[in-house]
Image (spheres, rainbow, N blue to C red):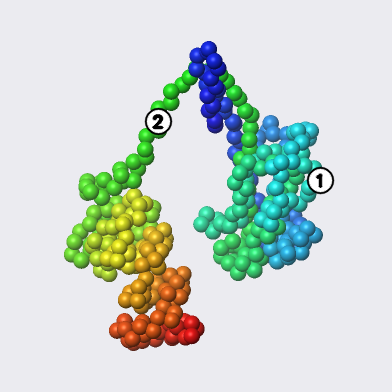
Amino acid sequence: MSLSKVSKPGSNDKSTFTEIETISFSHEWIIKNFSLCNRRMESTNFKSDDNDDRDWNLVLYPNGNTKRDNKCKGYLSIFLGVTSKKPPEEQDTDEFESDSDTECVSMSTVKPIAKVVYTISVRNSDPKKTRSLSITKLHKMTAAQGWCQFMNRELLFKDIDGFLKDDTLIIQCDIKLQGSISTTSCSNINFPKTSVSCLSEDLKTLLIGSNFSDVTLSVSGQKVAANKCILAARSPVFRAMFENDCVEAKSGSVNIEDIDVDIVEQMLQYIYTDVVPDLSVDNAAGLFAAADKYCLIRLKESCGMYLASSLTVDNCISVLMLADLHSAEHLKSLTLEFIKGKSSVIDSEEWKNMIDQKPQLATDLCRAFYAKK
């Protein structure tokens, strides 16, 4: 929706109000016994509604559209097709696209049949197991269009319980069309400014008062009140505790013995507000470990970035051990790169402790160190 103001000399202020209608619809294509598919297939035709003069369909090449490009071999090729009984709109080639990620099956006409934003997804019954590619801006479709290298077949068949559960492939297409455009003239409207969102601050108040809490976190003898629904929505670890028949679900209490209470409180502030706490040398490592334990991905990434940017000769060994313990391969590689050529590191007390506690990690460090030589 757009609003433009038009002023004419000697006239009262007027406004032009333009509304662009959008039409959204989806189609699901279920293919059973997919492992037996070895040739080009098409879905049935579908429409946005009964008044739509266009026929849409999905086209699948289970072994890749090699006629178009031999590089597609070993991939699923998936395309969205459209045909219309009405004459196409006015010819306009300026916005027609074709690149390595978006390939047209046919380019028989450059007259657009539809202006569309669309997403094609391969998924199973679990919404979390989804592979999606999208055209995210208004695109003028001429014929079928999509992706030649949508998904690697080896990856698809390797994850049998994921994308090919019961040898069934599910393809979903979500489409948004540009509809009619209406424009009217009206007197000048003074729209009030939109209020600033205060959702995070509102949720933060739930931590301050315990009137609505329904779970207690027991941390080093201290009690911290919280709300199951928010913990479960933000952390899959907490969700598993409360959904299953666990002690925590029955007692309404979660015992945390390996994290300091101040770190737990900062972690809760992130869970409730989605705002990463101010990071420092005092809390970054603790929050990093807590985020990994409760699967708070963005918080873990933010702490990892801070630790990587704060590496010194004195702390690099402890950061390396932390990254190894919590399977943070990117942070580990950055730390090893930092250590290369710094001979003072292997003379430190931390180095001696790592040899005793993490001999394999010490071996990796030696390789990195002497690779510089």
* Left or right, 320 with reference to 204: right
Q: Is residue 138 above or below residue 325?
A: above
Q: Measuring 70% from the left and 66% from the top, which residue is drawn there? A: 74
- Which amino acid type is marked by label 2? Lys
Q: Is residue 333 above or below residue 156?
A: below
User: Foreground residue, 202 or 211?
Assistant: 202
Q: Percent x, y for residue 248?
A: 29, 61
Q: Residues within 10 Å of mark 2 (few under 14, many from 20)?
A: few
* Left or right, 227 with reference to 174: left
Residue that label 1 marks:
108
Q: Percent x, y for residue 282?
A: 27, 66
Q: Percent x, y for residue 183?
A: 59, 23
Q: Is residue 1 in view from this perspective? A: yes
User: Foreground residue, 94 or 229?
Assistant: 94
Q: Percent x, y for residue 119?
A: 61, 48
Q: Is residue 253 in view from this perspective? A: no
Quadrant position of residue 69: bottom right
User: Foreground residue, 17 or 335?
Assistant: 335
Q: Residue most toward the top?
A: 10
Q: Measuring 33% from the left and 51% from the top, which residue is drawn there? A: 272
Residue that label 2 marks:
193
